[in-house]
Amino acid sequence: MRPGPPQRSDACGGDSKLERQDVKARFTPARTALAVLTALPAAGAILLSPGHAAAAADPPWPTSPPALICGNDDVLTGPSTPPAGAITVPAGDNEKFDFGKSGATYWFEPGVHTFGTDRYGHINVVENTTFIGGPGAILDGRRLNKYAFVGDVPNVTIKYLTIKNFGLDDPLDNRNFDEGVVNHDTAPNWTISYNTISNNDGAGIYIGSNNVVSYNCLKENGQTGFGGYRPQVENDSSQKNLVLDHNEIVGNNTDDWESRVPGCGCTGGGKFWDVNGARVTNNYVHDNKGPGLWADTNNIDFLFEGNFIDHNDGEGIWYEISYNATMRNNTITRNAWVSGRRNQGSPGPAIYLSESGGDSRLASTVSGAAAIRVYDNLIKDNFSGVSIFENADRFCNSNGNTSSGYCTPLVKPTRIPQPFDKTHANPINSSHPCFTDIKNEPYLTDCRWHAKNIDVRNNEFRFDKTVVPCAGPFCGAQALIAAGVDDIPWSPYTAAGVLNDVMYNNNNKFHDNEYHGDWRFAKGYGDAVSFNSWRGAPFNQDAGSTFDGDAGGEPIGYSDLDEDTSRLWTSMGRWQSWYSATPTLSTDAAHGGKHGLRVEVTSGSGWGVGTSNHPGFRTTPGPKKIGLWGKLGSGTNLQPFMRVKWLNRAEEILQTDDVRLPVLTDTWQEASALVDAPAGTATALITLHGTGSTGDSLYLDDFTVGPPSDTPPPDGPNIVDADTAGEGPTVGSWKSWYSADVAVSTQEAHSGTGSLCVTVTSGSGWGIALSNWPGFTAEAGGKRISYWGRQGTGAVTGVTLRLKWFDAGQALLRTDLVPLTGLTADWQQATGNVTAPDGTATVQLEFYGSSGTANDSVYLDDLRITNTA
């Protein structure tokens, strides 16, 4: 994610220790032995479960918000008379007031203070100054001034002020995007306390080194409640030693910047960037339009403790490509309901640990351990629980890393030098050792951010699917997963290798937790397993944990096959030799997990592998996904297929369906199909078939026979390439046609990690089309068409996919339309079955719409055109 441009600064200072303790004593709510019913104005009431309280009279997490600051006059009201020696600032226009006396204390009279009409009218602070507000003192930008406190100077104190309405009502202005209103320059040694900072553009506060931000109301600011950015420092962190304590952070990102700048990764309650040492304690973070608390890119040594994080649109806590953190004694409830439904290819967790882990070579003074520790938290009714994730393509000097100029803190140079090559398949800089030496140690290890040394223990996890608005496969899940498309040719890392590390080799453990409700457990590439499977080999997670849901022994949802037959986790499962082939469990090649099924051909007359459980696996009638992955061992022109026979209770064959892999290569390939198990189906009998010569070999893995997922897979290979389908890092073959721009969004996705974002540039209708005239290669016959869409900003209410079928001479044979109407903020699918006419050689595609005005947008994803016969 992006850090934003260099920022400017604001004022600081310090209350006496005694004064701070007095305020805290008269304000902090007492913890109770049992759960407390806390009224939350934006989302009703929460009854926090006694859970651990049954075993301990005082739960380790807050049972009510520890920082009810906004509107609390007991906390926010300043002195009614000037402190001794202070300079009085009169109410009214302070544009020409002299704030330039170093060492001075300024006391603002009660009333409204303004700064003229110039957009850069603000307080230019000097070092060692203090700014104190009297009762009801307001600094009002009136939408005429951009910032309140500016200056890259140390030792400034700001307290007891209301600071509001900074940022311009000017459509040509950037609305303070990636800028702060208070401490605009992220200056060091500021204290910002007992203020209301609200209704400003950009971030309310920027936090610099040795800043203390406490007892503030950071409310309804345009981008974030707080942020911060200093230019990158070689071999060091740009900011150090931050304290964020007892603040109420509510309702921020009112300008919805993720829709304005898709994939910016720049919104929510607040965001840390490149910080070493932060104490984030006792804050009430709620109802923000994005993540609650987000630490992104080379953050080191964090403590999140005693926070009450509730009902944010995104993740409660997101710790991304960062190191050494402790998250303890927090209450985290009802988060990611919006992001989880919007991006169903990602878990939407309460706590998201993304390419982050513990490393003993880096600081751990604040966090207390060279690890990421998540313990003694109440995690209740979030879209999902704790997600441990790593993307194989995200590493230093890779264009799969969105923090482009940054390397890990373990490799020198930590700053990747310009110029940058932004071609996805190339390194960002071809002279950096995370290209020239990346296949050798220490670079092979240290060029990656690793999800490792993560300990999730002694938490109370509660999930009620009647409360959480579930959608997709990850709702109510704990996740230990990885991803990657293996499309960076110089990368020494593979998705399968990273997956194995995350799951088995990186010391990531869930244990001694307490589960209540219908939790599921996601592993590998996102397949869900039961609690019993999660606890058993090879995962061995959640030892000592308790679970009051259906623990089960079979996978949840994704397949009618058992774990080993489907994924080859610990054995061959039910697979056995049938004729002219020898199947074995192999560690030489695996698509997911540690093993694949190796098939060696023993005769050239065709071969078969069967299962040992005639009449097959229990199943039900209805829509099914069948599929498998395959890879060549040795030989040529091997094209195996999986056959599924649907049997009734009398063991009569009702229907047979085949799914055939492409001709195998040394790269894993998938084949899958959507079929209908006929009425009366009771079991599915699975066999594998193929041809070849004696001694030929192949690898098969990840067999699926079961309910279709929320995102139906293709019947066979997609005619459209992955990027054009919305699944890759580029827009593929799409280009602007008229009145529209098209780009990749990594913030919104129906599945995977991204989608296509189309932005309307005028209100007269719009369209995008392919740039690869005359289109994609196609052939005559039945086709299934499918894509997904949802509104972005504005009022695009519909979109239509136009398919033009051409012959080899580029003569148009026919046009078909697949419309999607009634678009909303939720993903919806358009489908169609058409027949490409005789003589078809190519298909040209266009997306177009008639609704929407300039800057409106629509997201498109998972475009599939597959053969049905």
Image (spheres, rainbow, N blue to C red):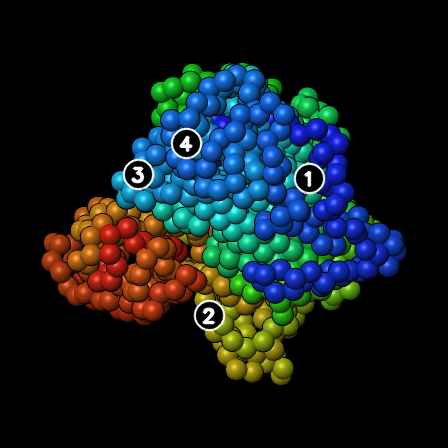
Labels 4, 1: front one = 4
Question: In the image, what residue occupies the spot 51% across and 69% down?
Answer: 624
Residue on which disc 1 sits: 281
Labels 3, 4: front one = 4
Residue on which disc 4 sits: 94
In this rendering, position of residue 308 left or right of residue 697: right
Residue on which disc 3 sits: 173
Q: Secondary structure at mark 3?
A: loop
Label 2, label 1: how many angstroms apart (C-alpha)? 53 Å
Q: Amino acid at mark 3?
A: Asp
In this rendering, position of residue 332 left or right of residue 806: right
Q: Amino acid at mark 1?
A: Thr
Residue on which disc 2 sits: 675
* Image spot of residue 457 (x, y percent): 77, 46
Q: Amino acid at mark 4?
A: Asn
* Image spot of residue 548 (x, y percent): 78, 64
Q: Secondary structure at mark 1?
A: strand
Work out whether residue 584 or residue 59 is closer to the camera in this orientation and state it. 59
Which is nearer the N-term, disc 2 or disc 4?
4
Which is nearer the N-term, disc 3 or disc 1?
3
Which is nearer the N-term, disc 2 or disc 3?
3
Q: Quadrant of the C terminus?
A: bottom left
Label 3, label 4: how many angstroms apart (C-alpha)? 24 Å
